[in-house]
Amino acid sequence: MIGAGTILNPILKIVTVVAILAASYVFIVRPVLDTTEGVIEKAGNSFRDNQQLRIDSEAKEREFDGARQGAISAAQSMLAGSQPWTEANRAITKCIRAAGKNLSAMRGCDRLGENASAALSDRNFATSYADTLVINGDTAGAARVRDCVAQAELKPGPMNRCQELAERLLFG
């Protein structure tokens, strides 16, 4: 005779196994998976953050090197000039030493060098034009340009105005 025990017994075994597997998943497997996922995510974030920091650091280092090289080049270009330009060379060189590894300060030195270079270029044009004015017989105009250059010192704006004055006097 087939009784209720023979059908119920295998069903109870299957239900028991399924319940044990479900409990194992809920209490063992799922927490381990969640923990592993969290650890992997944190490691990935840490790696990305470190990569970004390295990239940012390298970019700042390249920017620092570029600013430093620009300031050094400007300082060296000042060595060929007269007294005011050797003073500019000293000021830029002093700025570079004082900046150390400070990017912001080195940018300032680079700007100082750019301004001095611009003033040097304008000065060279203005004095050359003053010489041409003398050759053309306009000694008064040449004197005005030379006075302007002397008063402008190393300032780019005033020196640019001296060049413009010389151009006006020479070319009309």
Image: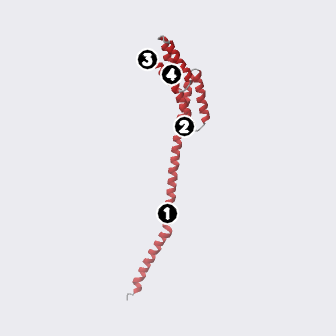
Taking the image as shown, residue 100 lies to the left or right of residue 22, namely right
Q: Which mark is residue 171?
A: 3
Residue type at mark 1 is: Asp
Q: Earlier in the sequence, mark 2 or mark 4?
A: 2
List the residue tagged with mark 2.
Answer: 64
| Of callouts 3 and 4, the N-terminal one | 4
CA distance separating discs 1 and 4: 74 Å
Q: Earlier in the sequence, mark 3 or mark 1?
A: 1
CA gap between label 2 and label 3 equals 43 Å
Task: Return the disc, 2 or 3, that comes first in the chain's sequence.
Answer: 2
Which residue corresponds to the image point at 53% horizontal and 49% vertical from the top-left? 50
Estimate the spatial distance between the alpha carbons at disc 3 and disc 1, rounded to whole Å.
81 Å
Q: Which amino acid type is marked by label 4? A: Cys
Q: Which residue is mark 1?
A: 34
* Of residues 53 and 10, the one drawn nearer to the viewer in this rendering: 53
On residue 162, the disc is 4
Residue at the location (50% across, 22% down)?
A: 162
Q: Nearer the viewer, residue 144 or 25?
A: 144
